[in-house]
Amino acid sequence: MQLEQQIISWRRDFHRFPEQGFLEMRTASIVANILESLGYDLKLGKEVMKEDECMGKPTAEKTRQHVEWARENGAVERFLPHFEEGFTGIVATMDTKRPGPTVAFRVDMDALPILESDTEQHVPMSLDFRSTAEGSMHACGHDAHTSIGLGLATMLAGNQDKLNGVIKLIFQPAEEGTRGAKAMARAGVVDDVDYFVASHIGTGVPQHHFVAANNGFLATTKLNITFTGKAAHAGSEPEVGKNALLAAASATLNMHAICRHSGGDSRINVGELHAGSGRNVIANHATMIAETRGETSEVNDYMKEQVKNIVAGAAQMYGTDYTIETAGEAVSAKCSDDLAKRLGKIAEQHSFIEKVMITSEDSAGSEDATYFLESVQQHGGQATYCIFGTDLAAGHHHECFDINEDTLLPAVEILFETAIELSHSNRNEVK
């Protein structure tokens, strides 16, 4: 019961102080401090993130400003220097010094750019743990994930005699927008991993249900597109101008008309378009944010290439320049069946779980943990992404999002039992 209250306390604290991707400085410093106190060996920041693979990082100025916000709101000062440039990943390692496989668990830490509800019906409001950072909110459960990760770390540290091999706990920044995992995977943090488990709460899975392998994640690419033209007076000499607004509008319409692919489902969306500076001015600047998705990486790559061709064509048609920046990306991946079956059997034994589904193919948006799955499997290991069902006050990414905290301790306990069982596996069985 004491651990359950601690996990809830952590979750509510992280909920009160949400931090968006690559700005998780307060969160990461607290996590690192707790992990160090539990005896884990730590690698932090740039040690576990490949700098040129970080996508969609905030500006240097915004990052500097957030260092001060984190400091003013309870960051652990000793660890801040590791994270103050926005490289906020953590890998905690426990080496039991006994022969066995390397088992890794991944949780994410970042929040969303959402203004949280302030109605009294909203539990975080009524219990006084609503976000104190206006415009940022844990509306996807990553506050719970981070707390589950710390709960797991606590249980593992107190039961080292039951474990073999090496345990890794990966605390990932910037999952939202699929921006952070690639940098950690490319830094090699899972190259030596035999078994890998990522987890999430909710996603429409009911309370007391468990999904051992979610295969429904779509590959995706997030694109920031800019058109640069030439301003002119719209009344006296419109022919002199190069209209960036029209280029962007043309690109938008044609992107939504991309021919589908026979290899699987595909998606395209232009979420924002900003252009122009005045009613009587030919727009010399337009910016768009868009995303593609595909059932497989091949389908997504097709969609992405079509977008690039359309943008180039629209720019040529209206005489503008253009840039395309990849602000986030995730690949498709399939979970390892054998590992999923083992997780399912472990979950079935927990009194909290009433129903186990080994595999789900339901569409679940996109998730950059797929980079970890892909890397582990390419190196001969097994990997899966599991879901702990929970009651939700509202859907993910909603201003009234909240979870049932009764889910937290069972999630920790199931992951703990998973760690014990996997750590006693023969490494030769994995390959």
Image (spheres, rainbow, N blue to C red):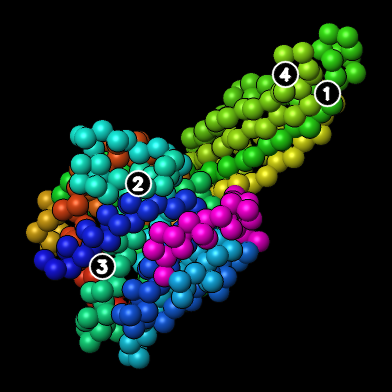
Cα–Cα gap, marks 3 and 4: 55 Å
Find numbered disc 2 in the image and state the secondary structure of the residue it sits on: loop
Cα–Cα gap, marks 4 and 2: 37 Å
Cα–Cα gap, marks 2 and 3: 22 Å
Kind of residue at disc 1: Ala
| Residue 278 numbered tag | 4
- In the rendered image, the residue lying farthest to the top is 235
**Relative to 292, is 83 above or below?**
below
Residue 404 in sight in this render: yes
Mark with earlier residue (1, 4): 1
| Residue 210 locus on image (x, y percent) | 22, 52
Cα–Cα gap, marks 1 and 4: 10 Å
Graded by Cα atoms within 10 Å as few (under 14), some (14 to 19) or many (20 or more), the crowding at tag 2 reads many
Q: Which residues are magenta?
A: 52-76
- In the rendered image, the residue lying farthest to the left is 351
| Residue 151 numbered tag | 3
Q: From the image, state whether disc 1 or disc 3 is nearer to you.
A: 1
Give the camera-side residue of 429 and 308: 308
Kind of residue at disc 3: Gly
Give the camera-side residue of 188 and 302: 188
Q: From the image, state whether disc 1 or disc 2 is nearer to you.
A: 2
Graded by Cα atoms within 10 Å as few (under 14), some (14 to 19) or many (20 or more), the crowding at tag 3 reads many
Residue where numbered disc 2 is placed? 131
Kind of residue at disc 4: Gly
Residue where numbered disc 1 is placed? 231
Q: Quadrant of residue 124?
A: top left
Quadrant into which the N terminus falls: bottom left
Graded by Cα atoms within 10 Å as few (under 14), some (14 to 19) or many (20 or more), the crowding at tag 4 reads few
Kind of residue at disc 2: Ser
